[in-house]
Amino acid sequence: MTELEKARKKYEEIPIPEELSIRIQKEFGQWEEPENKSAKGRWRIHFRQTAAAAAALVLLFTAALNTSTAFAEGAARLPVIGAAARVLTFRSYESSEKDLHIQVEIPSVELISEDFKGLEASVNEEIYRICESYAAEAQKRAEEYRQAFLDTGGTEEEWEAHKVEIRVWYEVKSQSDRYLSLAVMGTENWTSAYRETKYYNFDLEKGSLVSLKDLLGEDYPQLVQESIRRQIPEREQETGMTFWEELPQIGEDTGFYINEAGNPVVVLDPYEIAPGAAGTQEFEIKM
């Protein structure tokens, strides 16, 4: 029996006490924390959940789905990865003013296996920090841009027509018994200079994050570049653009996700490999 199967078996065998339904209702009422509790405090409380609490969450979702239409519509969009891991929206909020709209969805990765040894907490804390920081910095940039626009002769009416939008959200790129691949993104519709994407790739059997080196071996930089070079001619025909002859360096910071086939997909930002009009370019590296 693999470690993944052991974790799933242990998860499924967790006993559910009779009084749990009452406790679940109480917890559900506290899902929106009182205002005097800080976001940091809520975050720490979230990470103290055990496997039993995860089982309680499943029952909580079931009860809520049967009693709340709004909750059911939201839950329908939540990706679930077997019994080994799941991705939930930890915090979601919107802020709209006459000239600025902010939408934020912060994910939380829940890993059932005990073999992850704190990885869940550290990753979720990093995701939370990245999302909140991006949203705050993007709002500051938008406000500075607005002031510069007005200072150089623009009017309030002209500025409002810009309809500035800031969005922070996430996507589950793939989900299987072996891998969970998650992308956390931040964008601003008035500029592409600050677009940011962070990828998290989990090996659910080994209980660790996965790197290109783990998937492709020591020679992964060369293997990735060779694969990209083979794909460029067809990509140039598809886009009608000429790609750079010199390819970007491939290293530990190179963004990638794992697709449904279990292969890494290297993601190159605009201007890294082709003119900016070509946008972001993705290359599947078949193993």
Image: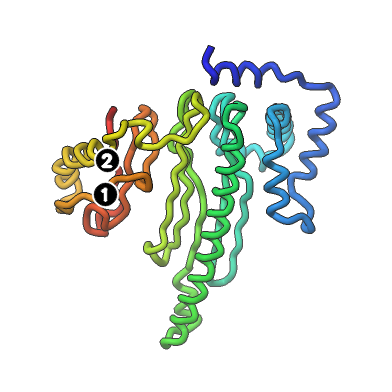
Please state the horizontal and vertical placement of residue 24, each as a whole percent of the image. Answer: 79, 33
Dot 1 and dot 2 residues touching (CB under 8 Å)? yes
Front position in the image: 123 or 161: 123
Q: Amino acid at mark 1?
A: Gln
Which badge, 1 or 2, is on the more N-terminal residue? 2
Front position in the image: 151 or 246: 246
Q: Is residue 66 visible?
A: no
Q: Is residue 101 left or right of residue 254?
A: right
**Circle 1 Cα neighbour tier, 10 Å, few/some/many (<14 / 14–19 / ≥20):** few
Q: Amino acid at mark 2?
A: Pro
Tell me: residue 126, above or below residue 188.
above
Tell me: residue 191, above or below residue 67.
below
Query: Farthest residue in the top direction?
Result: 1
Please state the horizontal and vertical placement of residue 99, each as a whole percent of the image. Answer: 53, 72
Q: Is residue 107 left or right of residue 280?
A: right
Please state the horizontal and vertical placement of residue 16, each as a whole percent of the image. Answer: 77, 21
Give the colour scheme of this rendering.
rainbow
Q: Is residue 207 left or right of residue 34?
A: left
Residue 32 numbered mark, or none: none
Query: Farthest residue in the front direction?
Result: 218
Q: Is residue 203 visible?
A: yes
Check disc 2 and report its element: helix, strand or loop. helix
Residue 249 numbered mark, or none: 1
Residue 221 numbered mark, or none: 2
Rendered-image quadrant of the C terminus:
top left
Q: Quadrant of residue 266?
A: top left
Q: Residue at x 39, y 34 (%)?
A: 258
Q: Residue at x 55, y 38 (%)?
A: 77
Please state the horizontal and vertical placement of residue 202, each as a whole percent of the image. Answer: 48, 33
Tell me: residue 78, above or below residue 97.
above
